[in-house]
Amino acid sequence: MNVGYGNRHIILNRSLAFAFLLATASFYLHAQENVFDAPVTMKMNNVKLSTALRAITQKTGFEFTYDTDLVMPDSIVSVNAVDSPVRKVLADLFNARGLSYTTIAKHIIIYREPDEDTRVIEEEGREPVYMVSGWIKEKETGQPLPYATLGIYGKGKGTVSNLDGGFSLKVTGDDLADSLRISYLGFRNLIIPVNILIGSNYNIELEREYIPIPEVIIRTRDPLALIKSIRLNIPENYGTTPAILSAFYRESISRKSKLQEYSEAVINIYKSPYARSLQTDQVSLYKSRKIINTDLSDTLVVKLKAGLNACLFLDGIRNTFDFISEENIEDYNYRIIDIISFDDEAAYVVEFNQKEHVTDLALFKGLIYINTDNYGVHSVEFEINEKYIDKIDDQFVPQSSKGFSVKVRKVRYKVDYRYLNGRYYLNHVRGDLEFYARKKRSLFGSPYFIFFELATTSVDTVNVSRFSRDETIPTGNIFSDIINGYDPDFWGTDNFVKPEDNIQEALMRINAKPGKFEQEF
């Protein structure tokens, strides 16, 4: 069975003790270094280092955050200080270990500066890179924040967190003097110097930011006017020149909780202009690999058709989302439900859904996040209206296997854009599909879960040219069928989206071909 996607207005048509407290973009690293000059008096003999640090916290109000592998909190220390500055106490505790310390908000950060002994990842012909990794979580609840945007400040290099909030980012020596900017809708930005993040896994906590907007302001804005403003401002917001995007792509097919196939790739995309252009996007494959479960007892084999093409097509500013197109907006209801913060600015949250009298189509419902100043789209979350989802089976399952009945249960998408140096770029696309397949004349069937995902890892607007014909790959084909071979050193210096824990566990369990699938995460 090949699972595809429909054309518009059929479907698209119509482990470490480390936690950062929130610092706003304008709050930078050394704003509270005077805590190091605060005098403390303490005498402690043969105590755990963690005990000594808690005593300093009680006296200063500053929490310590650190990588337990670096600091070794169970090690035994002694402190004898009489009106000594915190700086001297920390120097006595850490300088012999080669550790440094600084502040972010009300935290004292203990870290190690990168040096010649810091692990680097090397790949022939490419610049060595350092690894930054960890998890993005909500401060209040500790819950993971999926699909947070992480980018080197002012540069095109970045990634997104996965469904578990996990992330990894590879940076070069030139990036060590820069800062990492972490953004999430409705949360305050966090800016962290790159050099203090190298080589360890960190829990990074983001704090919600509430914008007190009188309800009358929301009620008096016309949501249809906002939708039209998106289209009017596309040339200014998204540019009239092409760009080259490097990106990570992956897709997965599971039956129940059992992984059947997992494919991933590093690709380059020629991103055609968003306005005044008839050019199409192109994809060039840089490296790829797949894993296929050979221990399958199922008679039904599911394959995802045109997952890459779907990612490009879901760039709905370039290809016009059904729910913002001029010819289709009469089929939707729109309502402004909130104004939230994002990237130190504000965004309208516009809810849309299918009008009640439109009963012959399965359209979308969801949310659009629109910048209140320039009307650029930060993010869109949308899914097929479940009330009419049975109308789309033929469009998503063009070729069902003989003897099987296949029904679509859920179709959900998320598309994000990153605002960089005055222009929006496609940043992240995620599609989650659920199907139910039952053998005819059988009482029971099985659910199948499919996802595809694309995350931009770098943007180049200088060295831009279309790919030659022999460099491009057919994005409308079944992606897993065009992948050959296996590279055990797959990632090298390239960035990728860290697999979720359940996927990593599944990959380790299954019998696979070709070769082995080593854990490189």
Image: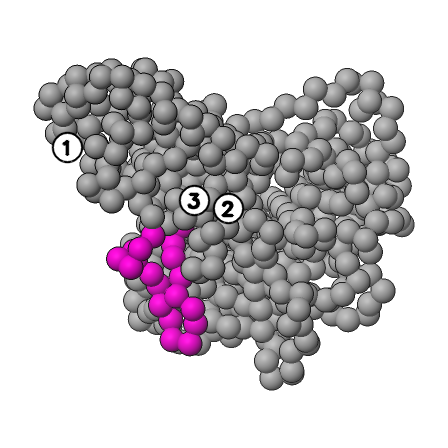
Work out whether 189 lies above or below 48: below
**Disc marking residue 180:** 2
Q: Nearer the viewer, residue 30 or 135?
A: 30
| Kind of residue sitting beneath label 1 | Ser
Residue 304: x, y in percent? 55, 61
The alpha-carbon separation of the residues under discs 1 and 3 comes to 29 Å
Instruction: Give the quarter of the figure containing the N terminus.
Output: bottom right
User: Is 494 a magenta residue?
Assistant: no
At a point 34% along the width and 32% down the height, the residue shown is: 65
Would residue 191 be seen by someone viewing this image from the given angle? Answer: yes
SS at mark 1 in the image: loop
Nearer-N-terminus badge (1/2) = 1
Position of 82 relative to 307 (above/below): above
Q: Which residues are magenta?
A: 114-133
Single out the mark in the foreground, 3 or 2: 2
Can residue 383 be seen at all in this image of the molecule?
no
Disc on res. 75: 1
Which circle's residue, 3 or 2, is located before the other in the chain? 3
Q: Residue at x 58, y 68 (%)?
A: 268
Which of the marked residues, 1 or 3, is nearer the chain's N terminus?
A: 1
Crowding at mark 3 (Cα within 10 Å: few <14, some 14-19, many 20+) = many
Task: Identify residue for label 3.
Answer: 166
| Residue 116 in picture, x, y percent from top left | 29, 59
What amino acid type should be assigned to the residue bearing mark 3? Answer: Gly
Nearer to us of marks 1 and 3 is: 1
For label 2, the SS is: strand
